[in-house]
Image (cartoon, helix red, strand yellow):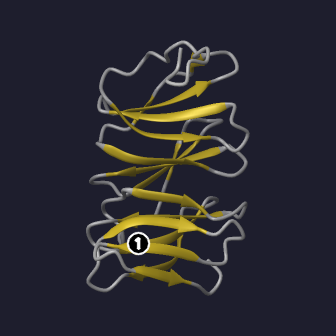
Amino acid sequence: RDWQGREAIPPLRGHGGSVGGLAFDGAGAELGSLSGDGSLRIWDLLGMQALPPIPIGDKSEAVLFSPDGSRIAVGTVSDGVRLFDLTTRAEIPVESAFIQRCDRLCRIGTSDRFLAGNALQGKLAIFSWEGGKILRTEVVPGEEILGVAVHPAGEEAVVLGKEERLFLWRASL
């Protein structure tokens, strides 16, 4: 049973280390999970089974499905953003010079873009799902990023800085 006394789903087993990041696909039928064992797993929640793991090798902190569920982004400690095609399971090359460490990932509405961030350096970048290109960058001056929320329409984001200040990032993400 879960914490509210409802019937709980069976545990999902398969990682060899602690689980860090989690994300649902847009339909809620799959769950992506990152593990301390250096792997990304995709869980088929309807069939209650894990698909074969995708080796990441690096400590990973964030995971995000593309709106159509065909790709997944992983934020890593030393390789920045890594992007994978879930049909072929192949890694897609990504521009990563701006963000070497990525610990924040946010979907930008249903667009072909997503937001990646480095909390300690106060860096944000907008990436393309299609080609892994950086489309726009921003540095929050003198701030660590504690949280990021993107408006559902994808026109603006709110960034929570270390000093509990909110920054509004506009101009059509």
| Residue 78 point in image, percent of width and height | 27, 54
The residue that label 1 is drawn on is 160
Instruction: Tell me the quarter of the image containing the C terminus.
Output: bottom right
Q: Name which residue lies at 31% across and 60% down.
A: 101
| Residue 65 point in image, percent of width and height | 60, 47
Amino acid found under the numbered disc labelled 1:
Leu
| Residue 94 point in image, percent of width and height | 47, 60
| Residue 1 point in image, percent of width and height | 53, 14
Along the line of sight, the residue nearer the viewer: 140 or 89: 140
Q: Is residue 127 above or below residue 69?
A: below
Q: Name which residue lies at 54% across and 12% down.
A: 10
**Residue 167 figure quarter:** bottom left
Residue 166 falls left or right of residue 64: left
User: How many dots with numbers?
Assistant: 1
Q: Is residue 100 above or below residue 77?
A: below
The single residue placed furthest to the front in the displayed view is 5
Query: Of helix, strand and loop, which one carries label 1?
Result: strand
How packed mark 1 is, by other alpha carbons closer than 10 Å (few <14, some 14-19, many 20 or more), is: some
**Residue 118 figure quarter:** bottom left
Q: Is residue 50 visible?
A: yes
Q: Name which residue lies at 62% across and 36% down.
A: 88
Along the line of sight, the residue nearer the viewer: 152 or 111: 152
Q: Is residue 96 visible?
A: no
Q: Name which residue lies at 30% across and 25% down.
A: 17
